[in-house]
Image (spheres, grey):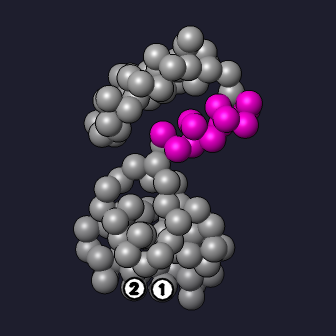
């Protein structure tokens, strides 16, 4: 990243102190690339939406991989279970939505 880009990221952080430097960097990259921001962090998601940045969470990523055939239902179920119960139990993904997908994908 250039020093100008780092300054822009710092400006974002100053305007929204509840965002981490990593959150601000991810937001900035999505903005300049006109890309999709992937985050399950509620504060970052709300901020991105308020700035008209397309934002999706972890479950959307799993859905896209499953729909495209990049990952099987069985593997998607296993990895989502691991993400929710072993890798990051504090991620805060909605249990009902996770359970629905895990059950659906294993059928």
**Residue bearing mark 2:** 11
Residue found at the very far left of the displayed protein: 18
Q: Which residue is mark 1?
A: 7
Say which mark, if any, is on residue 56: none
x and y percentages locating residue 77 in the rendered image: 52, 20
**Quadrant in which residue 63 is drawn:** top right
Indicate the secondary structure of the residue bearing disc 2.
Answer: helix
Quadrant of the image occupied by residue 15: bottom left
Instruction: Determine whether 31 is above or below 55 in the image.
Output: below
Q: Are marks 1 and 2 in contact (CB under 8 Å)?
A: yes
Asked whether residue 95 is in view, the answer is yes
Left or right of 91? Residue 75 is right
Residue segment shown in magenta:
59-70
Whether residue 44 sits left or right of residue 75 in the image: it is left
Q: Residue at x 38, y 23 (%)?
A: 99
Name the image quarter holding the N terminus.
bottom right
Q: Determine if the magenta segment contains residue 62.
A: yes
């Amino acid at each position: 990243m250039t020093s100008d880009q780092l300054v822009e990221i710092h400006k974002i952080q100053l305007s929204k102190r509840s965002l981490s430097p990593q959150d601000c960097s991810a937001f900035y990259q999505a903005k300049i690339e006109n890309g999709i921001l992937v985050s399950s962090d509620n504060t970052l998601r709300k901020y991105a939406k308020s700035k008209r940045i397309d934002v999706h969470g972890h479950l959307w990523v799993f859905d896209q991989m499953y729909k495209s055939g990049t990952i099987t239902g069985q593997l998607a179920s296993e990895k989502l279970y691991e993400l929710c119960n072993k890798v990051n139990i504090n991620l805060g993904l909605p249990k009902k939505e996770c359970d629905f997908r895990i059950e659906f994908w294993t059928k």
